[in-house]
């Protein structure tokens, strides 16, 4: 939702980790929610990815819950591991002290390259944590 350019089509690299895939998707123009969801939940179809766009920027650019966390919760739930959502939130909060998009983005000018770089980092880390939780 907060990415204002056309998405590039990317070829899935099956050997890439979920974190690498999430980073590639983010670089291609998908938001944090969409990137984590697609990288960690292969069965997420186009309709779900389109729906997930609304959760970028902390839910519709409201800067509330980090979209990467939201994408991770969606992916866990779609794969029957919804109960692990609390573990995802706890791990994210331990690493970053908050799950609030506004607080996570506070040091940066919104949509600056530094801001997007931080969002990309959070997206990659969250995708990796989702996979770790799915493998438990």
Image: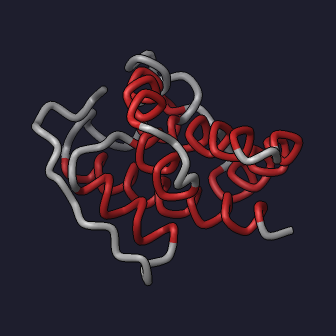
- Tell me the residue at 52%/46% (across/down): 37
Residue at the far bottom: name it: 15
The quarter of the picture where the N terminus appears is: top left
Residue 106: percent from the left, percent from the top?
42, 36
- Tell me the residue at 44%/83% (across/down): 15
- Tell me the residue at 49%/54% (across/down): 122
- Tell me the residue at 48%/21% (across/down): 59
Query: Image height check: is 129 above or below 5?
Result: below
The quadrant holding residue 98 is top right
Q: How is the image coloured?
A: secondary structure
Count of marks, rendered view: 0
Residue 32 falls left or right of residue 136 = left
Residue 47: percent from the left, percent from the top?
42, 27
Closer-to-camera residue (32/104): 32
The quadrant holding residue 108 is top left
Query: Image height check: is 52 above or below 73?
Result: above
Closer-to-camera residue (129/12): 12
Residue 38 falls left or right of residue 3 = right
Residue 112 falls left or right of residue 96 = left
The quarter of the picture where the C terminus appears is: bottom right
Closer-to-camera residue (124/77): 77
Query: Image height check: is 135 above or below 127?
Result: below
Query: Image height check: is 67 above or below 94?
Result: above
Residue 112 falls left or right of residue 88 = left
Residue 129: percent from the left, percent from the top?
67, 62
Closer-to-camera residue (127/61): 127
């Amino acid at each position: 939702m907060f990415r204002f350019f056309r998405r590039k089509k990317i070829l899935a690299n099956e050997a890439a980790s979920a974190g690498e895939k999430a980073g590639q998707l983010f670089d291609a123009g998908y938001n944090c929610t969409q990137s984590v969801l697609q990288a960690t939940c292969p069965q997420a179809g186009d309709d779900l990815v389109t729906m997930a766009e609304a959760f970028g920027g902390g839910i519709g650019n409201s800067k509330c819950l980090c979209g990467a966390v939201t994408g991770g919760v969606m992916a866990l739930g779609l794969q029957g591991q919804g109960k692990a959502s609390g573990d995802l939130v706890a791990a994210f909060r331990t690493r970053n002290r908050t799950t609030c998009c506004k607080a996570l983005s506070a040091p940066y000018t919104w949509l600056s390259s530094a801001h997007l770089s931080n969002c990309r980092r959070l997206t990659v880390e969250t995708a990796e944590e989702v996979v770790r939780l799915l493998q438990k």
